[in-house]
Amino acid sequence: MRTWLRFVYGAALCLVMWPASAASILIMGDSISAAYGMDIEQGWVRLLDQRLSQRAPGQHTVINASVSGETTSGGVRRLPALLKQHRPEVVVLELGGNDGLRGQPPKLMATNLARMIRQSRQAGARVILLGMQIPPNYGRAYTTAFAQVYPTVAEAEGAALLPFFLDGVGGVPALMQADGIHPNAQAQARLLSLAWPLIETALKAR
């Protein structure tokens, strides 16, 4: 949490100097977007901030509200205050992985994700949903139901979808930390490359 506060605080300082027309992007994620196991400066969200700053100086601000261990239930509780505080034009939801690892009901996860998408759209933001998958040892029925949540919710709620955020990263030893769950620093550019097309499209729709 301390790392996240420092990052958001830094973004807020930049916001003071940027023009009122700057587009804000709110990242609601878990440890994958909170740069677990590495310096926050190495994470894909920070790389996104750097890319936007290089391409259009002063035109975007990235708020990283990701928290390690976060679930969709936690996201539902935190999101309203963040929407009110930051008024983002784009909301990126990277949540659900911890729901799956804890064996939470996929229906509950779907309800929570749908609620966050509606809250974001009602606040005037475009929404991007970054999908996840869980290991097969949870059983075929559960892993299938879990994976289906993302496309089902995205279609029903009109959110842009990246089916699997760890595509080409998960299961690749050279790109994963020793725990086999979290991407390492070398994987962060790949994560950004996966999320970037959807983020770029959302920003162009301003």
Image (spheres, rainbow, N blue to C red):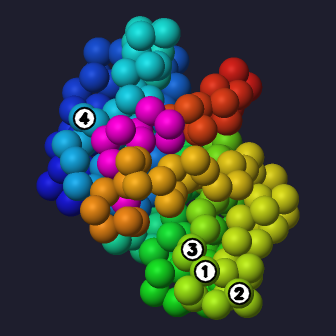
Q: Taking 133 as reference, is 172 left or right?
A: left
Tell me the tag on residue 134: 3
Q: Taking 55 as reference, is 6 left or right?
A: left
Q: Is residue 184 magenta?
A: yes
Residue 26 on image: x %, y %: 47, 43
Q: Taking 175 as reference, is 146 left or right?
A: right
Which badge, 4 or 2, comes first in the chain's sequence? 4
What type is the residue that disc 3 sits on? Answer: Ile
* Magenta residues, dominant SS class: helix
User: In terms of secondary structure, where does tag 3 sit?
Assistant: loop
User: Are there few (<14), some (14-19), or many (20+) residues within 10 Å of tag 2?
Assistant: few
Position of the N terminus by quadrant: bottom left
What type is the residue that disc 1 sits on? Answer: Pro
**Residue at image point 52% right, 26% down:** 23
Estimate the spatial distance between the alpha carbons at disc 4 and disc 2, rounded to whole Å. Answer: 37 Å
What type is the residue that disc 2 sits on? Answer: Arg
- Does 8 sit above or below residue 136? above
In-front residue for pair 183/64: 183
User: In terms of secondary structure, where does tag 2 sit?
Assistant: helix
Mark yes or no: residue 12 visible: no
Tell me the tag on residue 136: 1
Residue position marked by numbered label 2 in the rendering: 140
In-front residue for pair 185/30: 185
Mark yes or no: residue 139 visible: yes
Residue 40 on image: x %, y %: 24, 42
Question: In this rendering, which labeled residue sits more in front, label 1 or label 3?
Answer: 1
Q: Are marks 1 and 2 in contact (CB under 8 Å)?
A: yes
